[in-house]
Amino acid sequence: MTQSGAPARNPLRRGLIGLVGIAIAILGILVASQIGTLLPGGAVAATISPGPSPSPVPSPTGIAVEPSPTPVPPTEPPPSQPPPPVLVPAPLTGLLVTPEAAARHVIAVMVDDLSPARPQSGFNSASIVWHAPAEGGIPRYMMLFQDTIPGGVGPVRSSREYYIEWAAEWHAMYVHAGGSPQALETLAAKGHGQWVYNADEFRWGGRYLWRTTDRFPPHNVYTDGEHLRALAKRLGAADKPMAPVWLFAPDAPREERPRGGSIRVDYPTEIITYRYDAASNTYLRYINGSKKAQRDRVGGKVVAPKNVVLLRMGFGPLNDGHPQKHRLEANDVGKGVAYIATNGVTIKGQWRKASPTAPTLLFDGDGKPVVLTAGQTFVQVITLGYTFAIHDGEPPFWIPPPHRNDV
């Protein structure tokens, strides 16, 4: 029985009101978890999170709570990269090499050029190669090694006075197997570091030079860069920075190089021919009209210098008491006509050498120093009576159009 005037309680309505209250409370907790901390009395303390928060996880009471943020490890700087190697121009070629390579002591090696000695070893490791008449007009090489250490060199042959004076321009270690009386006398007096460092096979053979069994004497004396460097250290030819003598510049642009061109030098016993190749900007070298270019026995690659220098100078019989040897001496001190071929173009100029140890300098027709292309140089020395022929190629006939971004 109910009392009069008191409203009757509806259980369904009371349940709905309760559910709505619970929903509002849960919604408040969720909002607070996203924007701040729920304080007593329903207040919210605002917080700022550096990034997206982790998803809420259920607690033992069944109410979702915010987990503790995962600590972010500090960002480590990337590992430091080693600086690029410092490169400097090599004094004999102008090519960029390490300072260590640029300071290596120059090593000059006399190399045979008779047909039983071919193919010779060491051409493509040499910075400069001298080629000049020797006994009976038969030419002989002198290879100068500096920044590149050769894998093999030879056959090593005997010395001559004018080769010593060319090697003295670099205070080089001079490697040979005997020599003319004039040359041996000079080496005995000036070969202890005054002009050069004398490295005679007669004294140092067996350990630093050796005779191979695949060739007949005297065309079988060989050595290599490792043994030459060790011998230079033994003789006191220390490494140290040196100043360049010639000027060098990079290759001319492809579109400025001529097509074709050749140089022919006539020695009494052989003919040397160079054929200019514009693609590589080099002069491919040929012997006695062969259709195949000369190759280095070490590695088998074609011999192709960047520069060819032709020096004309006076030669005469060497009066050393052995006229049957037909030895020569050269007027290598002084001046004379020079032809300098580089980038496919030949310049007629002059060579000058002030003393036996002074450098051989190259000048153009106006008396200005010639600029060579960075790389290897072959020096062809001929007497005033030897014949030669130089034919430069056709000038460039096509110039590429300017670059367009829409092509």
Image (cartoon, rainbow, N blue to C red):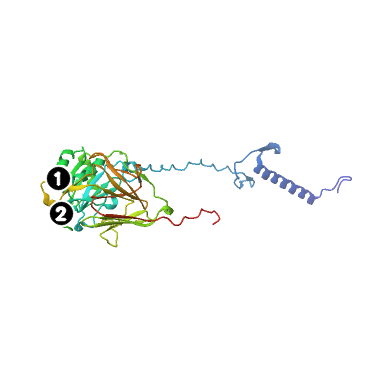
Q: Which mark is residue 75?
A: none
Front residue of this view, candidates 63 and 87: 87
* Contact flag, marks 2 and 1 (Cβ < 8 Å): no
Element class at badge 2:
loop
Query: Measured from the top left, where is residue 31 in percent x and y?
Result: 68, 44
**Is 403 left or right of 95, judged from the image as shown?**
right
The answer to whether any part of residue 97 appears in the image is: no
Identify the residue position indicated by label 2 in the image. Answer: 218
The answer to whether any part of residue 164 appears in the image is: yes
Front residue of this view, candidates 25 and 384: 384
- Report the Cα–Cα distance between label 2 and label 1: 16 Å
Front residue of this view, candidates 402 and 392: 392
Outermost residue toward the left in this view: 321
Query: Measured from the top left, where is residue 183 in percent x and y?
Result: 16, 44
**Is 31 left or right of 393, judged from the image as shown?**
right
**Is 49 left or right of 371, judged from the image as shown?**
right
Residue 297: quarter of image:
bottom left
Kind of residue indicated by mark 1: Arg
Classify mark 1: residues with Cα within 10 Å, few (<14), some (14-19) or many (20+).
few
Q: Quadrant of the C terminus?
A: bottom right
Query: Measured from the top left, where is residue 146 in percent x and y?
Result: 28, 45
Mark 2 or mark 1: whose residue is earlier in sequence: 1
Front residue of this view, candidates 92 and 205: 92
Query: Measured from the top left, where is residue 72 in percent x and y?
Result: 53, 42
Element class at badge 1:
helix
Classify mark 2: residues with Cα within 10 Å, few (<14), some (14-19) or many (20+).
some
Kind of residue indicated by mark 2: Pro
**Is 22 left or right of 290, judged from the image as shown?**
right
Residue 357: quarter of image:
top left
Outermost residue toward the right in this view: 4
Number of numbered tags placed on the structure image: 2
Q: Which mark is residue 203?
A: 1
